[in-house]
Image (spheres, rainbow, N blue to C red):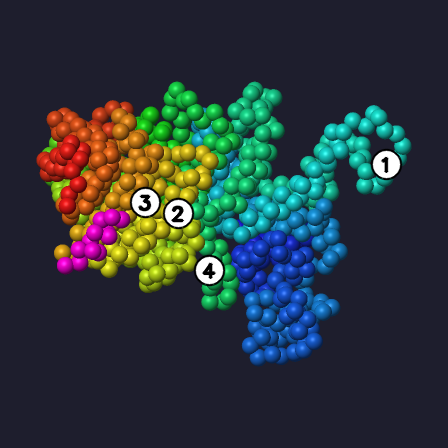
Amino acid sequence: MHVFPAEIPAAEARRADVVEVRVARKVAPLFGLDGDIPPFRRSWVCDYTELSLTEIGRGAPSPDRAERSRLDVTRPDRAPGTSSPDGDDPEWMWAGRAVWFRRQSSLSGTLSNATLNRYGPDTKAAAVLTAANRLLRGATAAVSEACRHLAGSGCDEEVRLAVWAGLVLEVYRAQPALVVAAIQARQVQRSLSARWGMQVDRAGVTGTDAPSEVHPPTLGGGDSSVGDGPAARWRPTSFDVVDATLPALGLADDPTTGPGLVTSDALDDIASAWCHRLLGVGRPGRGVVWMTEDARGSRHVHAMVRVGAVVAPFVAACLGASTGGRMAPPTLPTLPDVDVLTAVSVQRRRAYLLTAHLAANYVRYRDELLQDWPQLRASTRDLVSTAVNRCSEVLDADDPVALQLGAYSSYLDVWDLPRTGHDTSPASFDAGTTDNGAPGWTPPMRRLVASQERVLRAWRAGHLDPGAAAYLLEVGFVALRDAEITWTLHTDPAGPNTDMTSPASVGAWWSAILEARGLDPGADLAKTIDSLSPAQTFHLHHYAAWLARSGRRGDLRQALTLQERVAAVRAEVTRREPVGFAAKSAAARASHELAAEIATELALATPDRERGARVRALEVAARHARTVLADPSTGGLLRPTVAQPATLRTARVLARAFCTAVANGLSVDTRDAAATVTLLDAVIDNERADGQSGGGGRTGQGGGDRHGGRRSGSALLATLRVWRTELAGVCDDGRRPS
């Protein structure tokens, strides 16, 4: 179940709408919308650029020319396995996945050329755009109403634009092929409808124009690409879910309200820019898009997208300097009261409530905002928590928005534990509350595990779409693994990461994630990694981490093979992205960091009799550790406002890799040792300060990203000092172990 599914209209319609409805019902199955529409009762995923007007009129793709010619000659009335499904219609039959029609066939329901030729200036583009607008009419109305609410709520303009983009992105996720086709049709229509001659001064010419020459403005003036007269319905140029909803945000100059963030003319550029971004969803670092086929032969497209990763670069590119130089944190949206929500349709309730998740996801992707205003962590958590409470009052428990918000709220509660000054003494991990009354780590972690199981059941029952299920299960795993790493750091820093969640449960989650993303959960992905798309590979980072946690050599080797490929893809994404964000650059650094960690574990799991294999693993670990040190984002870990867990974990992985190499007789470059010592010094100073401050409560506004009164275990400080002493020795005397 999607949040904003297209609605295929019933065949019966009022006279004024009958053509629009018939076109929508023909277009829907061509772009993955399975409405069980007769006679074919199948959906396809067609390429708009390859689709013909005849195929649109029939509502099914045709065979290629050679196959069509062969079938025209043979003309079988009944071909076993190839005739129409019920065997009662000799006018068409299956030709593979395509449909063959007899020439001059008068199949009931086919749109005639006369009907389709009402559309223009490009008949195919106009028909597809008209159909998409009709199919997405309900979603468009829901997004528009949410945008009007945002405009009147005092929400920050930057956040408004991000939430709008996120709402449109959710419409895209429900029917990617249809939205892409509509965007392509919009581009064609606008290109052919733009009358360049309208702004040409004709004072220097006289006489009658040739038919194809530039003409003067028609009576009434205006741009012919825009119109609302009777003929406008046959010449659409706007994709309503984008073009009709953006003005509702109140970002542009307005005669009644005064100057806005942008000029009125800029709105069209912003809408076109977001359309362009949507065409790029599915590229590495911008989500994953995949196709599935059900038992009836119907094909569908699914998408998994992290909102911030796609929306943040778009907002930065559109607003530019408007997003920088802030003097205060962005104002988050407010949610309507329950009585307002109960008075509107379910789709509109979803749109209102989904703004909480979209705003929180966007703000949290902007890591620099969290560093400058740490209280945004608590503010976004509270916003999502409020939305969860509203869901319980106005949506069913198995509604996709209720499920998404509940799971995201549970994820935030665990993810923020090591980042908001929570007690990290060993006793706090097992306790429901700490000795000073502060909440312990166990309750939120248990709630997140229960949430993961709910997400899994909801997806199996069809209440969540595959993309949403894969995303929620993966981020939940990431938060739990993050807590496990924090536990390890404060109990046994020199050892492997501790499992605090049932391996069987986590294994079931990853099987579901891979299956939902169209991959075979039983396959050895290390053997097929080169055949996977870069976008799929980008999102195997956390799968490699899970695979490695068993500590078995076979799993570690597979995980290392996967992670080295992941690191290469993520590094390329970081170089390609024109707008730099901490989260994007940290993804590349984290991939090399994980590769170094896995390679170190593999070396330690290799017996002494296989010294050559151990040395090779340590060389791989050292190579990735050096790449981490060379990454520009690593220097940012020494900033006073940086999140302490990232600095601590990076220092641990690098120090462990280099010290293990030294212990096994490998040389470590003095520059690498010195850089790691610098990281260790920063961590040791912070941990010592935390230990001296005592207590387990938060400090600062809303809980900071640093210190926060956390208590550190003596095992951590002792291990950090041992590593520092060893690496400092490499720096001091430049020795190279033999």
From the image, give the main secondary structure of the stretch colored magenta: helix
Marks 2, 1: nearer the viewer: 2
Of the residues under marks 3 and 4, which one precedes in the sequence?
Answer: 4
Mark 2: secondary structure: helix
Task: Answer above or below: position of 528 versus 689.
Answer: below
Q: Is residue 603 left or right of residue 101?
A: left
Quadrant in which residue 493 is drawn: top left
Of the residues under marks 2 and 1, which one precedes in the sequence?
Answer: 1
Residue to which mark 3 is pinned: 591
Marks 3, 1: nearer the viewer: 3
Kindly tell me whether residue 660 is visible in this rendering. Answer: no
Marks 2, 4: nearer the viewer: 2
Which amino acid type is marked by label 3?
Answer: Ser
Mark 3 → mark 1, Cα distance in angstroms: 64 Å
**The disc label shown at residue 209, or none:** 1
Mark 4: secondary structure: strand
At horizontal 46% and vertical 67% (from top left) the residue drawn is 295
At horizontal 29% and vertical 44% (from top left) the residue drawn is 624
Mark 2 → mark 4, Cα distance in angstroms: 24 Å
Residue to which mark 4 is pinned: 292
What's drawn in magenta, residue-wise? 609-620
Mark 2 → mark 1, Cα distance in angstroms: 57 Å
Of the residues under marks 2 and 3, which one precedes in the sequence?
Answer: 2
Marks 4, 1: nearer the viewer: 1
Mark 3 → mark 4, Cα distance in angstroms: 29 Å
Mark 3: secondary structure: helix
Total numbered circles: 4
Residue 439 drawn at (x, y percent): 18, 36
